[in-house]
Image (tube, rainbow, N blue to C red):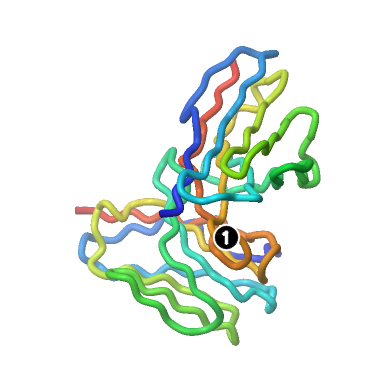
Amino acid sequence: QKEVEQDPGPLSVPEGAIVSLNCTYSNSAFQYFMWYRQYSRKGPELLMYTYSSGNKEDGRFTAQVDKSSKYISLFIRDSQPSDSATYLCAMYVGAGNMLTFGGGTRLMVKP
Amino acid sequence: GAVVSQHPSWVICKSGTSVKIECRSLDFQATTMFWYRQFPKQSLMLMATSNEGSKATYEQGVEKDKFLINHASLTLSTLTVTSAHPEDSSFYICSASPGGGNSPLHFGNGTRLTVT
């Protein structure tokens, strides 16, 4: 079993839809959680960074962390074709610890 | 802020030659940088941790003599793929954290290496 599980997709939605992307993890020591967006042939771009449980909102993006369930989510409101990319969740325990990635979910937003 | 620049963005080389990839932190200093490798439709795989002024730390299964890492300054790390073979063809990405500690990693735009 992988330490961080993420459905690879592809997830196809119509423009304007609300998108929900999720990751589950097994290591209860993870405290820092990130979501990255990666376009084809580009490096990952940091979207959201959260610590411990709770919600964080930034524009059309909302990140949720539920440490009791070992489950994190990224919501995208009013999705746009330009949101089409692979979304990677990542997490780590604390300073000096390695980042553990999910496998990524490929999202396609159709006009 | 927190820009990581990687060069070149793509390179084609012949088998047996060496290729150098540069990773620069443009607006912050990074004592530690990380090198990842990514195969098509797969997630990132950590290859090594580059430490300024000291030897790099390689992940299990990564040949240190093949993937030479030099971190000569607080803003520059280089990865040299020596005696490249077609199986080394991949997408190489570097990353660094501006604040160290618990700051998130920022990634370069990657280098696509094709070995013919």
Secondary structure, mark 1, is loop
Side of A15 where B30 appears, left or right = right
Quadrant housing residue B87: top right
Side of B5 where B89 appears, left or right = right
Q: Which residue is nearer to you in this view: A28 or B104?
A: B104
Chain of the residue that carries numbered disc 1 in the rendered image: A
Residue at 38%, 56% (x, y): give it. Answer: A107
Residue at 62%, 38% (x, y): give it. Answer: B77
Single out the residue that lies furthest toward the bottom: A68
Q: Position of residue B76 (x, y in %)?
A: 59, 38
Q: Which residue is nearer to you in this view: A84 or A8?
A: A84
Q: Give the number of callouts.
A: 1
Instruction: Give the quadrant of the N terminus of chain A.
Output: bottom right
In the image, residue A16 sits, relative to residue B50, either above or below, namely below
Side of B35 where A62 appears, left or right = left
Residue at 66%, 70% (x, y): give it. Answer: A94
Q: Which residue is nearer to you in this view: A1 or B23?
A: B23
Residue at 67%, 36% (x, y): give it. Answer: B72
Quadrant housing residue B37: top right
Q: Position of residue A3 (x, y in %)?
A: 68, 65
Q: Position of residue A100 (x, y in %)?
A: 63, 60
- Name the residue tied to disc 1: A102
Q: Amino acid at mark 1?
A: Gly
Q: Position of residue B1 (x, y in %)?
A: 40, 54
Disc 1: CA contacts within 10 A as few (<14), some (14-19) or many (>=20): many
